[in-house]
Image (tube, rainbow, N blue to C red):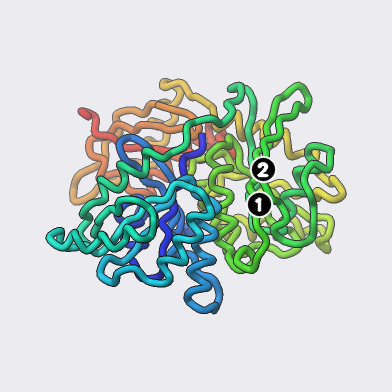
Amino acid sequence: MAKPVVAIVGRPNVGKSTIFNRIVGERVSIVEDKPGVTRDRIYSSGEWLNQTFNIIDTGGIEIGDEPLLVQMRQQAEVAIDEADVIVFMVNGQEGVTAADEEVAKMLFRSKKPSILAVNKIDNFEKKNEIYEFYSLGFGEPFAISGAHGIGLGDLLDEVIKHFPSEQEEEYDENTICFSLIGRPNVGKSSLVNAILGTERVIVSDIAGTTRDAVDTPFTKDKKDYVIIDTAGMRKRGKVYENTEKYSVLRAMRAIERSDVVLVVINGEEGIIEQDKKIAGYAHEAGKAIVIVVNKWDAVEKDDKTMQRFEQKIRDHFLFISYAPIVFLSAKTKQRLHTLLPMIETVSENHSLRVKTNLLNDVIMDAVAMNPTPTDKGRRLKINYMTQVSVKPPTFILFVNDPELLHFSYKRFLENRIRETFGFVGTPIKIIPRQKND
């Protein structure tokens, strides 16, 4: 189920990023054990009163060298298009400005739920200063202070009241839902058409011609699938050509609703930084992943070309070393027949459960082969491991002290589990717990 999306919109320098960081809290500063995950703070997750949601910081969207007002308008357009609920932020120390009124007009046209937040009210004895903001037409303003974290609870109470009801279609548990993500013009639409055998999606050489997200159920070899299209560009305009990050925003909901994510790379152009960013979101969401190198027919090849390209992918995508790689051409359908079987394999691994006794045999053998580390004279003692969930497979490792489990030893245990049980295409999580917890 896709989470609701909250966008923080407003002119520059009203404190949007401060509030964004306050709301997402520690999630922003999580450090991945494995190297190579590219972080981007424009889009993250928040939680309030047991409701989780995604949040967009438009302060993180950088758009060329246009004048400030144009940039502000473009940033707001991107976020408004994506959001279910909008937090319209203004600066309480500066009063209503012409730029605030410009944003207000855009929000009225969007007809989306918008909540007015007056930031930088650090002294609540001056709360009466917010009343001039009634003139913007959004009802009662919420006085907040990003610097001191004041008033955010009341603001978030109001935000979650406007979340949409859960109306998305649920599919049978045996149906594999998969999405295609990637930067513009890697051939996602062509690949959808090739898989379905129809021209359902408009295909163009111009980047960003896909307009809407559509779920397409289909059956192949008696197996049910659903393609969850990555939502494309709903509006034309320079903003979407200039904002690479926009493709990440549009991919997030598709990722959340998928069992398997296909990270599509353009074989002609090779790997760029944006490919890593997009793949990083799928990895962090805990989804099964297949790396698809499209347009392979257009690549000049010798007998080592595929091997070299695969090594380049492995070097750049260290954080998804578990993901299999499929080389194909949507245009000529070369090697296309290998894709659905691979999707089915990684989906099965994403849902794989391992019996506790087998799991602990592997762990004990691993410890015998490579004894646990010590720190300041104390040795890590592993009691046992058990699997607690799937999608992704998640394991609790009971130890004498979780602080003694160094990330390198955890990675060693993960590798041993993978060598024994496979888990091709899926991340796995190992969570250390003290035995008496």
Residue 114 percent across, percent down from the top left: 42, 50
Contact (Cβ within 8 Å) of mark 2 with mark 1? yes
Q: Residue at x 56, y 31 (%)?
A: 168
Q: From what the image shows, is residue 69 above or below residue 392?
A: below
Task: Name the residue beneath numbered marker 1.
Answer: 232
Query: Which of 429/226 is in front?
Result: 226
Residue 130 percent across, percent down from the top left: 25, 61
Q: Is residue 328 visible?
A: no
Query: Which of 33/49 is in front?
Result: 49
Q: Marks 2 and 1, how far apart in space?
A: 8 Å
263 horizontally vs 113: left or right: right
Query: Which of 308/240 is in front?
Result: 240
Residue 204: image quadrant is bottom right
Q: From what the image shows, is residue 357 above or below residue 34?
A: above
Residue 54 percent across, percent down from the top left: 44, 46
Residue 104: image quadrant is bottom left
Neighbour tally class for label 1: few under 14, some 14-19, many 20 plus, Cα within 10 Å: some
Residue 131: image quadrant is bottom left
Residue 269 percent across, percent down from the top left: 72, 65
Secondary structure of the residue carrying numbered label 1:
loop
Q: Residue at x 66, y 43 (%)?
A: 229
48 horizontally vs 215: left or right: left
Q: From what the image shows, is residue 77 above or below residue 289?
A: below
Task: Give amino acid for label 1.
Answer: Gly
Task: Give amino acid for label 2.
Answer: Asp
Query: Which of 221/408 is in front?
Result: 221
Task: Name the residue beneath numbered marker 2.
Answer: 229
- Choose mark 2 or mark 1, whichever is in front: 1
Tell me the tag on residue 345. none
Secondary structure of the residue carrying numbered label 2:
loop
